[in-house]
Image: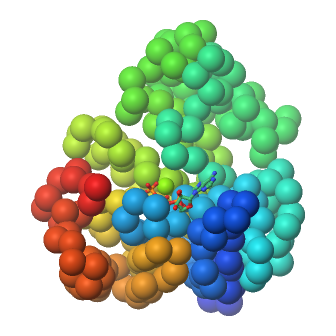
Amino acid sequence: MSAPGAPEALRLSGVSAAYGPYRALFDVSLGVEAGQAVALLGSNGAGKSTVARVASGLVVPTSGSLFIGGTEMTGSPTWRIARAGVAHVPEGRGVFSALSIEENLELAFGRRAGKGAGAALARAYDEFPLFYERRRQRAGTLSGGQQRLLSLAGALVQPPALLIADELSLGLSPSVVDDVYTALGSIQRAGCALLVVEQQIDRVLELAVRAVILERGSVAFAGPSNDAPAAMASILAARGERSLALPGTGHSRTE
Ligand SMILES: Nc1ncnc2c1ncn2[C@@H]1O[C@H](COP(=O)(O)OP(=O)(O)OP(=O)(O)O)[C@@H](O)[C@H]1O
Ligand SMILES: [Mg+2]
């Protein structure tokens, strides 16, 4: 957990963001303490991935500020934010499917490890013997779940200060979701803060102590993760929708 007084891993302060004329985020403020896991929830199009992109520098806010580890980095390029300790596994499988498994791992380690990349690669192969056996194969030949694990391998071997994971469990079978969440738990125990984007909330709330729910580009709830299911239900009820994403309902989405 976070050391007393440690700067927050992530802080968005009054962030608005847009894609051209389309405004996707409105005055969003949220934080992730050092070593803490926070769930970022909300329906399709609520703005979750946009928050993830703002936090990793892929989207620059139109107003408001981004702080990484207590340092303002609004408008900094993605490489500088990555160097400050932020790793982002984007939506989709987060791997380069035309590159080999080894090339994917080298890219993941090279970004932060520099000359230590060889040792990190050896540790990744210890942890995931399958990736060693198949190291020369294209990453696109791995199953969907194996690709998600490959996208987490870098963070497992060399935990960043903050890992942003965007809908890692989407489309995976429950046992593979277990593997993904086991990996996320290990990454957090190594001291890494997590911002975990999910639509399906049961699994992520086991990991996260706090949750933020976005609704149409604004923060509709922020608080203890235990209170998130009720908050989600009332947000959806206010919209006249029944929650299909409450605990126990498996992988349903609200589409
Ligand atoms: N590249 C883009 N260009 C234009 N509009 C975009 C782009 N990416 C997202 N948007 C719009 O911004 C809004 C927020 O999208 P975002 O991807 O952040 O939602 P999300 O909560 O991640 O949704 P989902 O659960 O479906 O992944 C949506 O209305 C979406 O259509
Ligand atoms: Mg998304």
Percent x, y of residue 201 = 29, 65
Q: Residue at x 35, y 60 (%)?
A: 199
Q: Quadrant of ligand 1?
A: bottom right
Q: Is residue 203 visible?
A: no
Is 121 or 11 nearer to us in this picture?
Answer: 11
Observer-nearest of 87 and 20: 20
Q: Which quadrant would residue 190 be assigned to in this image? A: bottom right
Q: Quadrant of residue 160?
A: bottom right
- The answer, for residue 148, to whether it is visible in the render is yes
Residue visible at 60% across and 62% down?
50
In the rendered image of this protein, does residue 41 appear above or below residue 231? above
Residue at screen point 55% across, 10% down: 137
Q: Nearer the viewer, residue 108 or 215?
A: 215
Relative image position of residue 66 (x, y in whole percent): 75, 75
Relative horizontal placement of residue 203, taking residue 30 as reference (left or right): left
Residue 122 left/right relative to 156: right
Q: Position of residue 229 (x, y in %)?
A: 25, 77
Name the residue located 43 percent from the left edge and 76 percent from the top edge.
215
Q: Quadrant of residue 2?
A: bottom right
- Above or below residue 36? Residue 124 is above
How far from the left and from the top, in percent, is residue 214? Answer: 45, 75
Figure disc tally: 0
Q: Nearer the viewer, residue 83 or 242?
A: 242
Coloured how? rainbow
